[in-house]
Amino acid sequence: MKIFLTGATGFIGSRVLCDLLQSGHQIRALVRSGAKRGNISEAFQLAGVAEEGLIDQVEWFDGDLSCIHALEDALTDMEVVIHCAGAVSFNRKDKHKLWETNVEGTKNLVDAAVSTTIKHFIHVSSIASLGRAEKGADISEDTHWESAKRNSFYSITKYHGEMEVWRGMEEGLPAVIVNPGVVLGCGDWNAGSNSLFKYCRNGNRFFTSGINGFVDVRDVSSAILILMEQQVCSERFILVSESMSYKDLFTMICCEFGEREPKTYIAEWVVAAGVPVSAVFSRITGKMRLITNETIRTAYGVFNYSNLKISEKTGFKFRPLKDTISDSCSYYKKKYDN
C-alpha cells in the first residue's frame, strides 16, 4: 500500500514508520528541512530490525504542513494518509505554533486529501481533545467536549484539529481518529512524556493527586495499522492501556529502577505558588517553563478512560502498563546509567 506519513521523525511517527516498512508498505514521508532523525534509528533498534535497506525505501518529501499546494503534490499516487505530526506544549508562548501545526496544518492536509484520491485518512489526536466525564464516570469516545477555562490551549488545538478531520469526513474523506493517552516507551527521557522515567530515576519522591490514561507507543502504532488494515472509517478510538494515578505510576517506575517509592504528597496550592517563579526563571534563562497553570491542571486532574470500543470493534488488546514500564526502565538503565 502507498502511504503518506507525517511526523515520521517523532516518537510515535518513527515507530509507525518502522512497523509500516516491516509490513512491506511503500512510504512517502513528510520531513522538515534539518529535522533530526534519531528517533527513527532508535525505533528500528528497539524493534530488532536492521535499519539499513528498509530505511532506503522511504521517499522523503521535504516540506511542512503550511502549504496546501505542496501537500497536494505530496499526496499524488498515495492511497493512505497517516497524520502523526503535531506540536505539544503547555507553555503560553507556544500558542501560535500549536494552532499553526495542530489546527491549520491538519486543515491543509485534510483539504489536500479531499482534493485527491486518498482512500483512508488516519489522524493521530490525543485524549486531551476529549470531553470530561461526570464525576465517577469513565471518559469514552462519546463524551462531549465542553469549552471551559480548565482546558489547556494544547487540548483546544487538538480538539479543533479533530473538527477539521470530521469536516473532511462530511466532504467524503474516509477517515478515522485515534486518541492516545500519555504515550510511554523507550526513547529519549529528556523530552515529552518519557521524562517521567527520568523524574523517578533521579530520586524525586513527590507525587500529585492526578489520574491519567497511559499507553505504550508500540500499542499506538499497532492500533493504527489494524485500523488501516480493517479500513475502519467515520469513528474515533481511545488508545489507553490503563488509567492510573501518578503515585502508582511513579511507584511502579521507582520499583523497576530500584529507587525508593514516592512518599510525599505535594498540594496543588504549593505547586501553584511556584508558577510566578518559574515564569521569571524562564525569562532569565530562556529555558522552557517547568510549571504552568496548564501543567498543574494536568497533574491534579482525575481522568479515567474507557478503552472498550477499539477492543470490541477490532479485537485489539493492549499490553499491561507494568510490561511497558519494565521494558522501558530496563532500556533507560542501559542507555543512561554510567
Image (tube, rainbow, N blue to C red):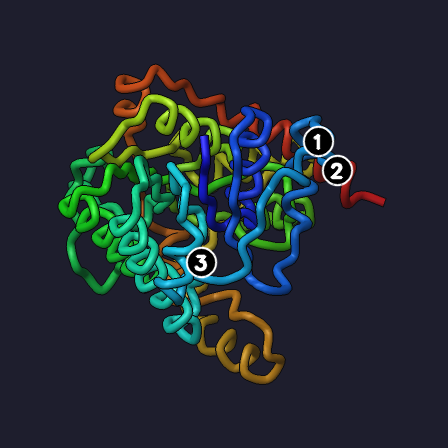
Q: Residues within 10 Å of mark 1 (few under 14, many from 20)?
A: few
Q: Nearer the viewer, mark 3 or mark 2?
A: 3
Circles 1 and 2, Cβ within 8 Å, touching? The answer is yes
Q: Regarding mark 1 in the picture, which secondary structure is present there?
A: helix
- The quadrant of the rendering that contains the C terminus is top right
| Residue picked out by circle 3 | 88
Residue 150 pos. (x, y %): 26, 60
Residue type at mark 1?
Ser
* Kind of residue at disc 2: Lys
Determine whether 330 is above or below 85 in the image. above
- Distance in Å between CA atoms under marks 3 and 1: 26 Å
All told, the count of numbered labels is 3
Determine whether label 3 and label 2 are within 8 Å by CB.
no
Which label sits on residue 330?
Answer: 1
Label ID, residue 80: none
Give the number of the disc on residue 333. Answer: 2
